[in-house]
Image (cartoon, rainbow, N blue to C red):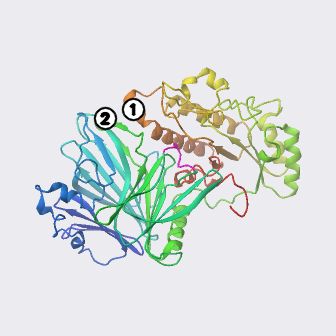
Amino acid sequence: MNITFDKSHGIFKLDTPNTSYCMAVTDKAWLGQVYYGPRLSTTDLAWALGLDQRPNTPKVLPEETVSFFDCYPWEYPVCNMGDLRSCCLAVRTENGQVDCLPRFRDYTITPGKPALGDLPATFDDGSHCATLTVHLEDPETGIQLALLYTAFQDLDVITRSVRIVNGGESAVQLEKALSASLTLPYEGNDLMLIHGSWAREQILDVQPIGPGFHGSFSHRGIPSHQDHPFLAILSPGANQTQGRVYAMHFVYSGSFLAQVERDQHDQLRAIMGIQPEGFSWELRPGEGFQTPEVVLVCSNEGLGHMTRTFHDLYRNHLIRGVSRPRPVLLNSWEAVYFDFDEEKLLTIARQAAKLGVELFVMDDGWFGRRNSPSGSLGDWQVNYEKLPDGLDGLSRKIEALGMAFGLWMEPEMISPDSDLYRAHPDWAIATRKHGAMRCRDQYVLDLSRPEVEEYVYGAVADVLRSGAISYLKWDMNRPITNLGSAALPAHRQGELGHRYVLALYRIQERLLREFPNLLLENCCSGGGRFDPGMLYFSPQIWGSDDTDAYER
């Protein structure tokens, strides 16, 4: 097994083909990060923590607890407990104070990789990886942490996530629950991020890491066109073929934080997880919270090895059905927009079939009274004036031409001018004082409500059952703003964003189980939700609304 614990030195060591990741238990209580880099043959590494030098030494406790805590390379740093750098966990207890200091308890090492509940995550059949679970516990509050690490045997990959359980007697509020922290020495490194905007997504940005904070984030409810949940720390002079690269990628489809801090001692701390701005989560006694997964890659052969490692991991351990051939498709949108009927579509389809197109996709405008960008989102009933034989009739006629049939939907949205909104105005995400805010003349459905989640699943499933539909383009064309749920109590409003993402995942998972041959393509105005979390459900993503071949 590629994970070991050396009791004599108190060192955990996780090995991949070319790298090692090491942690130490200091003073029988504090879990710290010792090393991440080229593979090591030894576990005699406690010296690397510099514990014989003030203020790093535990001997300064308790007189200089803050000095020690503020220098120690914590594996999972917590807020308000003496470490004054970027933190991963903030727990507000029943007395209103942020107060949690977990200590090492025990660990387990198991073959394979556990699933993470409703969250997408990398997977394995048990033959390519092993998982270390380190248990921490705060006896004063009862908060228990399970730090999950999976080391792959054939790829230079380590995945991380955290399970937080309230083992105390009173409810607490999580106000920050990130997934991973990484501590490295500063060596003149650069930081690589991915920025952009609509129709110009995925632009690489490399900048020197100066003192203070650097990074990217989203609080748009989606990863966004503007930022991507990724960061890489580059050694000086690193390029495609040489130099060391440390990369972190977030398997999540909502708001995120990816940040690097260069502190007063020239240490780098990289953190990644759910965007804490506006986030909170109540944990009652016995309840748990699972953070999404972060993928770590360390490359000693430059950016090329780093990117190929991610590609190999996602193709073999994240994307389901990746080997399925993708059909050549024609989408009706830019040919006809909303102005079509069945005969116009069939005229286009006949020409497409002659050219060898394999899949004909009907885009927006086939449902409700949808003749413009305004109205009918949420009313997913076919417009029989345009399609007199319905979806079943049109799909059979497309099949007769030798092509498969697919269509477009935007299931997460609701139009103010729709039967659904008139019946359920409280289903739109909205704050109580200012209401919902329009974008593209539409609102966002509150998927955190079980009845809304069920409605969306049922509406999409009914459409897919109504014809020979083998492809679904799932669009999402606006950010989520004015976060407020008419169903959540006041102290749980901060849960809305994450509950929304979990519901989205459940809906898509249920659809894929009922329709196992469905090709689900994720489109979020192009690249707005282009992340590994969505790749788990949709192996095909519309990368950008910029269709210029050179820029693509």
Q: Which residues are magenta?
A: 219-224
Q: Is residue 425 above or below residue 9?
A: above
What is the x, y in percent for residue 410? Answer: 65, 39
Instruction: Name the residue type under label 1.
Output: Arg
Which of the two discs, 1 and 2, labels the residue nearer the N terminus?
2
Can residue 350 be seen from the camera position used here? yes
> Residue beneath label 2, please?
284
- Give me the residue at 41% from left, 58% from top: 113
State the residue in front, 122 or 366: 366
State the residue in front, 270 or 427: 270
- Give me the residue at 28% from left, 77% from top: 42
Q: Is residue 304 left or right of residue 190?
A: right
Q: Is residue 169 left or right of residue 377?
A: left
| Crowd around label 1: few <14 · some 14–19 · many ≥20 (10 Å) | some
Judge whether residue 223 is colored magenta: yes
What is the x, y in percent for residue 329? Answer: 76, 54
> Residue beneath label 1, please?
492
Quadrant location, the N terminus: bottom left
State the residue in front, 400 or 55: 55
